[in-house]
Amino acid sequence: MVGGSGMFIDALCNGLDEIPTDPNLRKELIAYVELNGIEPLITELKEKDPVFYEQVDLNNPVRIMRAIEVMRISGQAFSSLRKATKKVHDFEIKRFIIDHPREQLYNRINLRVDLMLENGLLDEVKSVMDKKHLNALKTVGYSELFEYMDGKTTFDEAVEKIKQNSRRYAKRQLTWFRKHQDAIWIPFESVDAMKNKVLSKIT
């Protein structure tokens, strides 16, 4: 398996914790965010669960609302309930993480944003302006360009925000991956060289 959210990878490898849910409270939180924005819930999360606050993508309102939902139901920090009790598999799991030097990683992120824009990201955002209220579109790349389309920022400011938020997301990903002490970090070089290093660890 290649790529994907760290949470999804952990769910596949370790299984899912049994965490309480309340559909009515979730509806209340969605209505609250639509009226007040996600910022008050981010503040509540930072106060009640600084551990998860440091891990979660703050541009993902669904995960923030889920954490608040769980904490209000249980009275406990969301991170304390995520025990990640590992499943027993009949196969071995090895984690490989490409290790980019920080400056190189950030340069690649900036270049990727420029390429996305060259390949029509702005037109894509324009085509879904009427759906910008949907949670699926409240993500890095869309949110910043929605603000530009609404006249809240200039285009250059929106592009810089996309790059900045993408770099922050990458930093949180690295923090997430570092908690796996069994992970094998592969220094970034040519694809063939990295492939050979991975193969040497699994054969």
Image (tube, rainbow, N blue to C red):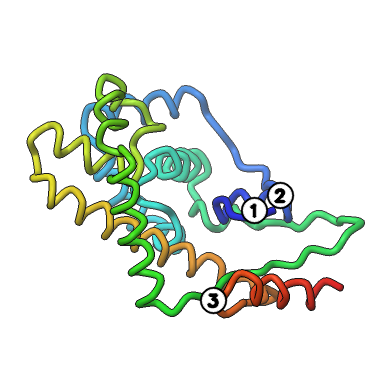
Q: In this view, does 44 lie to the left or right of 196?
A: left
Q: Which amino acid does label 3 sit on?
A: Phe
CA neighbours of label 1 inside 10 A, class few (<14), some (14 to 19), many (20+): some
Q: Name the residue located 38 percent from the left edge and 65 percent from the top edge.
A: 108
Q: In which quarter of the image is the C terminus?
A: bottom right
Report the residue marked by disc 1.
9
Q: In this view, does 191 lie to the left or right of 171?
A: right
Query: Residue 137 at what x, y percent from top left?
Result: 36, 33
Q: Which amino acid does label 2 sit on?
A: Leu
Instruction: Give whichever of 39, 162 is nearer the camera.
Output: 162
Q: In which quarter of the image is residue 152?
A: top left
Q: Which residue is most to the right?
A: 90
Task: Assess whether mark 2 and mark 1 are in contact (beta carbons under 8 angstroms).
Answer: yes
Task: Assess whether mark 3 and mark 1 are in contact (beta carbons under 8 angstroms).
Answer: no
Q: Which amino acid does label 1 sit on?
A: Ile
CA neighbours of label 3 inside 10 A, class few (<14), some (14 to 19), many (20+): some
Q: Which residue is most to the top?
A: 130
Cα distance in 3D space between marks 3 and 2: 26 Å
Helix, strand or loop at label 2? It is helix
Report the residue marked by disc 3.
188
Q: Name the residue located 31 percent from the left edge and 31 percent from the top edge.
A: 124
Marks 3 and 2, the one that precedes in the sequence: 2
Q: Which label number is shown at residue 12?
A: 2
